Image (cartoon, rainbow, N blue to C red):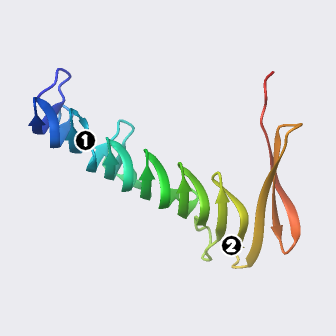
Amino acid sequence: MVFTDGTVYRGKFLNNRRHGHGHYRTENGTPIYTGPWKNDEPGTGYADILYPSGHRYKGNVCDGCRDGRGSLWHQDPDGDSTFLYRGQWEADEMHGEGELHCSDGVYRGQFVHGLREGKGRFEYAKSTETLSYYEGEWEEDQPHGAGTFVDEHGQEYAVRFSAYWAPQSSTTVITACVHGRCRWLRTESSSTET
């Protein structure tokens, strides 16, 4: 079936609607969505999706949304790809166990609604031969609670990260404690309008 915009669907139909396994492609043949269809909409099962941003997802979907186990990477127009995430998804967000690759390192652990939360390990991108990492508790995408930090020299520290909010000034203060000695890391201010 060829649509007015030049895109093409090849696959199964039911009652003149896309239903079952099918391939949806651009007019030049670039795949957009390959996977299950139900009642003329992307369905539930295993799919291969290429987004307009250049991101590509392969894995389980529910009604066309990433849900279950899957992998995401960015594909450049020249064909090079950068791996971003492999793990569990729920309602189109990273949720459950997963592995996230960032420019400054790799996180392996738990996610809640797209954020690092729960137990996890972040390995910093190598600047020296010694692996530097933080392993422990996370909250709202930040180290929070008890954990272990190993610096670039291989020195291991038992740490406790905490953040507290000062409502009078709309300021969050973030500290880290090592062997009972706490140290200020940063202060984040949020402006409020009246």
The kind of residue on which mark 1 rests is Tyr
Q: Is residue 50 left or right of residue 179?
A: left
Q: Is residue 70 left or right of residue 158?
A: left
- Taking the spot 28% from the left edge, 46% from the top edge, the residue there is 44
- Taking the spot 10% from the left edge, 36% from the top edge, the residue there is 13
**Quadrant where the image shows the C terminus:** top right
If you read the primary sequence from the N terminus, does the residue marked by circle 1 or circle 2 appear first? 1
Q: Quadrant of residue 107?
A: bottom right
Residue that label 1 marks: 33
Secondary element at tag 1: strand
Residue 178 in picture, x, y percent from top left:
82, 71
The kind of residue on which mark 2 rests is Glu
Q: Nearer the viewer, mark 1 or mark 2?
A: 1
- Taking the spot 73% from the left edge, 64% from the top edge, the residue there is 145
Q: Is residue 65 above or below residue 87?
A: above
Q: Is residue 35 visible?
A: yes
Instruction: Give me the disc on residue 165.
Output: none
**Quadrant where the image shows the N terminus:** top left
Q: Is residue 98 above or below residue 12?
A: below
Residue 53 in picture, x, y percent from top left:
39, 38
Answer whether labels 1 and 2 touch (C-beta < 8 Å).
no
Secondary element at tag 2: loop
Q: Quadrant of residue 162?
A: bottom right
- Taking the spot 87% from the left edge, 65% from the top edge, the residue there is 182
Q: Is residue 87 above or below residue 44?
A: below
Residue 117 in picture, x, y percent from top left:
61, 57
Q: Is residue 80 left or right of residue 36?
A: right
- Mark 2, Cα crowd under 10 Å, few <14 / some 14-19 / many 20+, is some
Q: Is residue 75 visible?
A: no
- Mark 1, Cα crowd under 10 Å, few <14 / some 14-19 / many 20+, is many
Instruction: Give me the disc on residue 152.
Output: 2
Q: Quadrant of residue 116?
A: bottom right
